[in-house]
Amino acid sequence: MKKFFALIFILFSQLTYSLDLPLADVISEPEDNRVHKFLVEVDDNFDIRGLVRKTEETIQRINLEEVIEGFVLLNKEGLDVIILTCPGYDSVHGGEITLRYLYDGLAKKYRDFNMELLRDGDDWSLFTVSEKIKINTLKLVARRFLGRLIGIKKILVNP
């Protein structure tokens, strides 16, 4: 009987197997330098199932379909501040990801930061599109007008 339950447990654990692999840290200056740790959730073949965002207080799981369609990571005062999109993304090979961010909340202007999420064997990494620099950390730099936070001025890679 113990062997039967052990077998059931092993089979069940294989069906729901997932692993979270570290991807990059995002330091948000507009949130008093709050650190968001991003991870990729992979299955037993190391294909991506989704993304995970962790802070000291929360864990947010985002399935791959939501990211492909476009997912609002942050909304403040009725404005989408950060939107993550990756149309045409492939869970086996990766693809380009666009981080759309609110540059100027007064004029409702946005800018895009493009990255590539690429697979290397059983590992996944983020790279800048233009220079192919591996991204370990992104820093969101606050944009202020008359001392008031109005958006994200720029995104720094590996500051």
Image (spheres, rainbow, N blue to C red):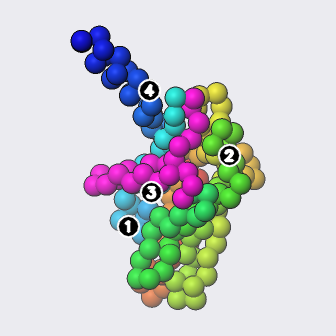
* Mark 4 or 1, nearer chain start: 4
Residue 11 % position (x, y): 41, 23
The mark lying in front, picked from 4 and 1, is: 4
Whether label 1 touches label 3, CB < 8 Å:
no
* Mark 4 or 3, nearer chain start: 4
Q: Amino acid at mark 2?
A: Asp
The mark lying in front, picked from 2 and 3, is: 2
Asked which quadrant contains residue 66, the reply is bottom right
Q: Which residue is mark 1?
A: 31
Q: Which residue is mark 2?
A: 90
10 Å crowding of disc 3: few (<14), some (14-19), many (20+) = many
Whether label 4 touches label 3, CB < 8 Å:
no
The magenta segment is 45-66
**Residue 95 sits above or below residue 140 on the image:** above
The quarter of the rendered structure image containing the N terminus is: top left
Residue 38 visible in image: no
Residue 145: mark: none
Residue at left offset 47%, top offset 54%: 62
Q: CA distance from mark 1 to mark 2?
A: 32 Å
Whether label 1 touches label 2, CB < 8 Å:
no
- At mark 3, the secondary structure is strand
The mark lying in front, picked from 4 and 3, is: 4
Residue at left offset 56%, top offset 32%: 46
Residue 14: mark: 4
**Residue 14 sits above or below residue 47 on the image:** above
